[in-house]
Amino acid sequence: MSHNVAMTVAAVILAASAESALADVEGLPRVRRLVDLAWSGGALPIVVVAPDPDGAVAAALSGAPVTLAEPAPARLGPAGQMARGMEVAAGEVHGTEAAILWPARLVWVGPETVTSLIEAHGLQGDAVITPTYQGSRGWPVLVPASALEMLRRIGPDRSPDEAMGDLLAAGLPDLALDLGDPGTVMDASVARDELPPYEGPSAPVGGLAHEWGARVADEPEDEPLVGPALAPYGQAEDEAVAGD
């Protein structure tokens, strides 16, 4: 593998509705685009947490290396959905060290940003790692697996931004990285041609050289397409309890 990264960091893509998951982005369903970006950036496993009442989200993810997870009950709020995705990721790959929590509206994030978050986790494994752009904190945010229990305790009325603030208030280290990626703060409401230029970090995180997209390029062309795997809520909840 061409990434100089040995750790296992998941991507958890969070869509509040099937409509949000399936919204078109340059000819692709939103979640399919994000799965491809996460894979190219080096995240593994990849979990999509989204309602799928008629199977359309699963169909959009056909052939992708992803697990589609039924959401947690709405009464658990945004933090409950984040925890749900982290639980499923941990069940998919034992020893998953962290998860990149990725609201599906952030469609312009570059794979370079994913790789940089993973590399930064290798340098400070206990930190909540947030990308910034021109001084503004953005998404996706890397959360260490050790924070899962804290995430479960966050109130359902807390927004995603507030939930991350609560993790930091609980004592987790805060690492903010200026990655020069406007897609971390500008969502699908901004057209691609209206985005500022991608700047990129001033130096590679940890001094490592990237080969962007190498993971995808290295996959054998004749490898059969499979997936997505499906994780019903009750089943995953039982596995999480069994693993405690």
Image: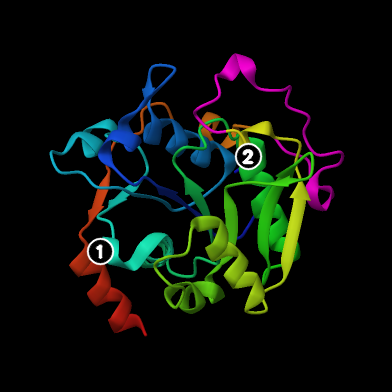
Mark 1: amino acid: Pro
Badges 1 and 2: C-beta atoms under 8 Å apart? no
Asked if residue 2 lies left or right of residue 242, the reply is right
Outermost residue, front side: 157
**Does residue 229 sit above or below 123 in this rendering?**
above
Asked if residue 6 lies left or right of residue 179, the reply is left
**Does residue 75 sit above or below 12 in this rendering?**
below
Residue 218 at x, y percent in the picture? 54, 33
3D distance between C-alphas at marks 1 and 2? 27 Å
Numbered tag placed on residue 184 in the rendering: 2
Q: Tell me the crowding category of disc 1: few under 14, some 14 to 19, or many 20 or more residues within 10 angstroms, Cα based.
A: few
Q: Residue at the spot x=44%, y=30% of the render?
A: 33
Mark 2: amino acid: Thr
Residue 189 at x, y percent in the picture? 50, 27
Outermost residue, top side: 193
Numbered tag placed on residue 193 in the rendering: none
Q: Residue at the spot x=63%, y=39% of the render?
A: 184
Residue at label 1? Answer: 73
Count of picture labels: 2
**Does residue 212 sit above or below 79 in this rendering?**
above
Q: Which residues are magenta?
A: 187-211
Residue 222 at x, y percent in the picture? 36, 28
Q: Is residue 233 magenta?
A: no
